[in-house]
Image (spheres, rainbow, N blue to C red):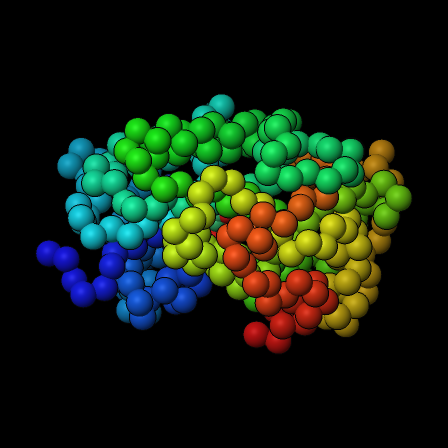
Amino acid sequence: MSGARPYILIAGCGYVGQRLADRLRERYEITALVRSNDKAAALERQGLKTLVIDLDRVRAGASLPQRLDQEAIVYLAPPPAAGESDLRLDRFLHLAIVPPKAFVYMSTTGVYGDAGGELVDESTPVMPLTERARRRVSAEEMTRVWCHERRVRRVVLRVPGIYGPERLPLERLRKSEPVVRPEDAGISNRIHVDDLVTACEAAIENKEARGVYNVTDGNSISSTTFMDMVADLAGLPRPPRVSMEEAQLTFSPERLSFLNESRRVGNDRMLKHLGVKLRYADLTAGVRASLKS
Ligand SMILES: NC(=O)c1ccc[n+]([C@@H]2O[C@H](COP(=O)([O-])OP(=O)(O)OC[C@H]3O[C@@H](n4cnc5c(N)ncnc54)[C@H](OP(=O)(O)O)[C@@H]3O)[C@@H](O)[C@H]2O)c1
C-alpha cells in the first residue's frame, strides 16, 4: 500500500494548507482532510486526494488512512469556537492510530497573552488571556503528551497574523472601518503565508526540528501602522482613528481581545534552529507581492 513517495496528511487544508500542499505535492503523496464536501470537491479539482471528516461530529467508522510510510501529519484545523479545550484535536488524535514520523501543529502567538509591548520568545511562559488562547494552550499540551507517548517528533509553530494574497484587510479599508489611534495601539506581528509554508516545510524536513518555534517576519508594529501601510500601498485612504475608549464601545469582543494584547515576538529560533530563510522579512515587499497576485 505504500507508494514511491512518502505520505503526508494535512488535517485542515484551507488557506495555508492548500499552499503547503502545492509546495509539497511533487515530493510527497498528500491527503487533505477537510470538513465539507464542497471544499473537498474544490481540492479534488486541483488534483488533491481528500478525506472529509467533520471533527466536531466524527461518525462511527470514520478513520484515517493507516499508512506506515507516514512522514508527517500537519494539523492546521483551528480549535472550536467555544470551550476550554480543543475537542476537535482530541477527536482527531483518537483517529490517528498509526503514528507519523513527525507531527506539526499550528498554534498562535496568542498563547503568550499581553507582554506590555516587551519581547517574548519560546522560553517565555504562556499566559493566555482569552478562552480562545486557552484552547490553544490545551491543544499544544495534547500534542505534547500524544507525541511523547508515541515517540513522535513534534513541532509546534506559534503563528501571529497571517497575510498574503487575498488575505489583506482591503475590504475593511474600502468600508473605512476605524482603527485605534497609533498612541493607543499595541504591538503585534505578522507572517507572509509563503514564509509560513516554508516554516511548515522545514518542520517536516529538518529532522533536528522539535519543540516550539515562533514563526514571524521579525517586524513588530501596531495593527494601525499595518493598516496604514496596506492602505498606502493599495492606493486607498488611511482608515479613520478612534480612541481606545470608543473602540471598547464599538469593536467586536474578538477584535478588542487582540487590541488588549501587546508583544514583540522574537523569531531567532525559527531562523537559527528551524533554518527558515524568510522571503518577506521586509513587510512592505510582502504586502506589495500580496497585492500583485
Ligand atoms: N488567520 C490568522 O491570522 C492565523 C493566525 C495564527 C494562527 N492561525 C491558525 O493557523 C491555522 C491555519 O489557518 P488557515 O488560515 O489556513 O485556516 P482556514 O483557511 O480557516 O482553514 C482551516 C481548515 O480547517 C478545516 N476545519 C475547520 N473545522 C473543521 C472541522 N470541524 N473538521 C475538520 N476540518 C475542519 C477547514 O475545513 P473546511 O474548509 O471544509 O471548512 C479548513 O480546511 C488555523 O489553525 C488558524 O487558526 C491563523
Taking the image as shown, residue 242 lies to the left or right of residue 274, namely right
Query: Up-down: is 21 above or below 270?
Result: below
Front position in the image: 120 or 244: 120
Front position in the image: 209 or 60: 209
Report the residue at 59% width, 67% height from top. 279
Residue furthest to the top:
84
Residue furthest to the left:
1
Report the residue at 85% width, 34% height from top. 245
| Residue 171 at least partly seen | no
| Residue 127 at least partly seen | yes
Taking the image as shown, residue 91 lies to the left or right of residue 276, namely left
Q: Quadrant of residue 173?
A: bottom right
Front position in the image: 48 or 189: 189
Report x, y in % for residue 2: 14, 57
Report x, y in % for residue 210: 44, 43
Task: Count how many numbered circles sit on residues in the image.
Answer: 0
Query: Up-down: is 258 above or below 84?
Result: below
Report x, y in % for residue 104: 41, 46
Q: Quadrant of residue 254?
A: top right
Front position in the image: 242 or 77: 77
Report the residue at 49% width, 61% height from top. 198
Q: Quadrant of the N terminus?
A: bottom left
Q: Quadrant of the C terminus?
A: bottom right
Query: Up-down: is 182 above or below 4?
Result: above
Report x, y in % for residue 292: 62, 76
